[in-house]
């Protein structure tokens, strides 16, 4: 992700007009030319004609969305070829499409799909070309997780925005819509047409290890408004938005990547707390909804995860909420969906429950053959597959993939990471930084009174495609604002020796900025801030992930919350500290007292300003 060079990708030439026409001849013969992106789909009868000509094997393939290693569809690096052979049994994306006829491919930074925008566009074109040149070839729906904040697969120089909880702190529907519009336009320019965002979970559990700041907040009404606004932005730019994780992942202390969570909400509480953002997404015309690998006994007492639950996906989502768009599973490699059934049963049960897209199975060959066998043996009907394939084809048609599957470098240069887009991200971030404590009006920090600033603290791995480390980014931003700032990384679990080193450095500084990351009662970070304050040097604590840190830092004279440690949020925090902008963010979640979690220390909506 940090390699933004423009070396040869092995697939850099944009397909010629002749190639495009030849490759798309099969589908354009069957479909009338579609209108602009996100226009109404062509007559279903034409899409049904496409389905009727597909072999059973091709139909099964259309239901899968798969990872593949490499920066090129045909000439990836040898290490990526080796990884593909080991995990999928093919060498390249082109071979994956030829063998399994998958309907979608998901991009990951760790799979080396997203080095830089031109390469991403070339990879997308190579994937489309490989698929469209097959007999009865169809365009591929390319997707990724670009939530912004702490989850982003496409990094600099693309525009990176504050994450959901930061947007929740800004509480602006207009900002949420702008985020979706710009982020969607940039993804589309690189050939990515489906984004697994926004997160529609209402985060009411401070101990939630998997959602947290990926949620807009704890108030279902506020979350609903921001979800709908972001959906409108993304889909207005011709990218399918995806509300996740249905029926709601906001109240769990188990990560479904590594365990099997249970949501204990009553049906009545689910209706009031978890359902509203998904209702809002559906009302906004959401293109796809992602399932959650968790159990909700009040909605289905079978013990099955929601991804495999017909009562939840068909009974509630389809029939009660009236949703007829695409339903995609969360990754089928996650423990939450694998714990009860084997990997061969999971895709079959998901389709029986009402799923349309099977995302990233750990063993594609096993999963693909399991679905094929289930149809041949009568457990699944071909008609059931046709229902899902038709939904997927409708979505591809609405997104303009039948009409215009390719992208160009000129579009990348015109749209991705432009000065105007980067400025919009900065403006949005400035409305999200939240000031929680400001004793003696320490902030804003005067450059004349406090010229030398020491920045210490946690330096977690930088979110994809941002500069990092956080202490360095903060120090750099403060230096640009006229301070003499130095960075000293102390980590998320500083030792006594590390704390002593920071304390010694603080005595030579005029002020200290301490970046904290998920502070707990026994954390070395807590001891660090306490001992820094004891030096008498003014200390500004900046919670760079969860805003709950402030409850563990009662001695810090000033506390800010940024909700993430991406560059855009850290730069905003620096401008707030320096007084270049006023803090405007308000807590989108309550912060409980550290010594008595039943008591609220700072309620939803709390925030100070200058």
Image (spheres, rainbow, N blue to C red):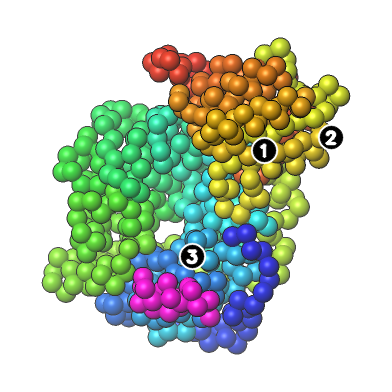
Q: Are marks 3 and 2 in contact (CB under 8 Å)?
A: no
The secondary element bearing badge 3 is classed as loop
Q: Residues within 10 Å of mark 1 (few under 14, many from 20)?
A: some
Q: Name which of mark 2 and mark 1 comes first in the sequence.
A: 2
User: Residue, x 76% and y 30% (percent of image)?
Assistant: 453
User: Residue, x 60% and y 73% (percent of image)?
Assistant: 122
Give the magenta part as a residue range: 75-93
| C-alpha span from label 2 to label 1 | 19 Å
- Left or right, residue 325 beside residue 591: left
Image coordinates for residue 486, horizontal then vertical, percent: 74, 37
The secondary element bearing badge 2 is classed as loop
- Left or right, residue 55 beside residue 460: left
Asked if the magenta segment contains residue 77, the reply would be yes
Q: Which residue is mark 2?
A: 482
Most extreme residue toward the top, as rendered? Answer: 440
**Disc number at residue 111?**
3
Image coordinates for residue 338, horizontal then vertical, percent: 25, 54
User: Residue, x 64% and y 81% (percent of image)?
Assistant: 13
Q: Residues within 10 Å of mark 2 (few under 14, many from 20)?
A: some
User: Residue, x 23% and y 51% (percent of image)?
Assistant: 339
Q: Residues within 10 Å of mark 3 (few under 14, many from 20)?
A: some
| C-alpha span from label 3 to label 2 | 40 Å
Q: Is residue 322 visible?
A: no
| C-alpha span from label 1 to label 3 | 32 Å
Q: Name which of mark 1 and mark 3 comes first in the sequence.
A: 3
**Disc number at residue 475?**
none
Q: Which residue is mark 1?
A: 488
Q: Are marks 1 and 3 in contact (CB under 8 Å)?
A: no
Asked if the magenta segment contains residue 507, the reply would be no
Q: Quadrant of residue 287?
A: bottom left
């Amino acid at each position: 992700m940090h390699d933004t060079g423009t070396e040869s990708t092995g697939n850099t030439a944009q397909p010629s007009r002749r190639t495009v026409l030849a490759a798309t001849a099969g589908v354009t013969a069957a479909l009338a030319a579609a209108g602009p992106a996100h226009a109404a789909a062509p007559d279903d009868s034409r899409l049904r004609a496409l389905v009727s000509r597909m072999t059973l094997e091709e139909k099964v393939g259309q239901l899968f969305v798969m990872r593949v290693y490499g920066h090129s569809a045909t000439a990836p690096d040898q290490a990526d070829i080796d990884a593909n052979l080991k995990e999928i049994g093919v060498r390249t994306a082109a071979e994956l499409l030829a063998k399994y006829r998958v309907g979608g491919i998901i991009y990951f930074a760790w799979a080396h799909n997203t080095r830089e925008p031109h390469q991403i566009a070339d990879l997308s074109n190579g994937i489309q070309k490989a698929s469209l040149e097959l007999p009865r070839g169809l365009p591929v729906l390319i997707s990724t997780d670009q939530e912004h904040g702490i989850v982003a697969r496409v990094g600099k120089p693309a525009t990176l925005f504050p994450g959901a909880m930061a947007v929740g702190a800004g509480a602006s529907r207009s900002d949420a819509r702008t985020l979706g519009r710009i982020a969607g336009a940039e993804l589309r320019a690189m050939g990515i047409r489906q984004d697994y965002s926004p997160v529609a979970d209402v985060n009411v559990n401070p101990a939630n290890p998997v959602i947290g700041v990926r949620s807009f907040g704890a108030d279902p009404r506020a979350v609903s408004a921001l979800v709908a606004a972001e959906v409108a932005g993304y889909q207005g730019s011709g990218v399918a938005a995806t509300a996740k994780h249905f029926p709601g992942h906001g109240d769990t202390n188990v990560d479904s990547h590594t365990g099997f969570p249970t949501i204990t909400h009553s049906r009545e509480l689910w209706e009031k707390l978890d359902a509203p953002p998904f209702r809002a997404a559906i009302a906004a015309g959401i293109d796809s909804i992602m399932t959650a690998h968790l159990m909700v006994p009040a909605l289905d007492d079978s013990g099955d995860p929601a991804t495999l639950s017909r009562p939840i996906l068909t009974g509630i989502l389809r029939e009660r909420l009236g949703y007829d768009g695409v339903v995609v599973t969360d990754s089928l490699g996650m423990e939450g969906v694998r714990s009860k059934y084997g990997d061969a049963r999971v895709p079959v049960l998901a389709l029986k429950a009402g799923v349309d897209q099977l995302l990233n199975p750990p063993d594609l060959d096993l999963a693909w053959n399991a679905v094929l066998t289930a149809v041949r043996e009568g457990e699944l009907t071909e008609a059931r597959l046709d229902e899902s394939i038709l939904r997927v084809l409708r979505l591809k048609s609405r997104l303009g993939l039948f009409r215009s599957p390719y992208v160009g470098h000129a579009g990348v240069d015109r749209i991705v990471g432009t000065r105007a887009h980067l400025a919009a991200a900065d403006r949005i971030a400035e409305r999200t930084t939240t000031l929680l404590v400001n004793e003696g009006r320490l902030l804003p920090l005067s450059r004349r009174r406090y010229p030398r600033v020491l920045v210490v603290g946690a330096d977690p791995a930088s979110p994809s495609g941002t500069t990092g480390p956080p202490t360095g980014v903060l120090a750099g931003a403060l230096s640009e604002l006229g301070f003499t700032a130095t960075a000293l990384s102390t980590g998320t679990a500083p030792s006594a020796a590390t704390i002593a080193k920071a304390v010694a450095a603080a005595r030579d500084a005029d002020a200290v900025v301490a970046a904290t990351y998920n502070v707990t009662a026994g954390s070395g970070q807590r001891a660090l801030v306490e001992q820094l304050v004891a030096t008498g040097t003014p200390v500004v604590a900046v919670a760079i992930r969860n805003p709950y840190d402030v409850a563990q830092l009662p001695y810090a004279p000033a506390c800010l919350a940024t909700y993430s440690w991406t560059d855009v949020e850290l730069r905003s925090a620096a401008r707030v500290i320096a007084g270049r902008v006023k803090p405007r963010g308000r807590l989108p979640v309550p912060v409980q007292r550290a010594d008595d979690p039943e008591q609220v220390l700072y309620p939803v909506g709390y925030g100070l300003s200058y």
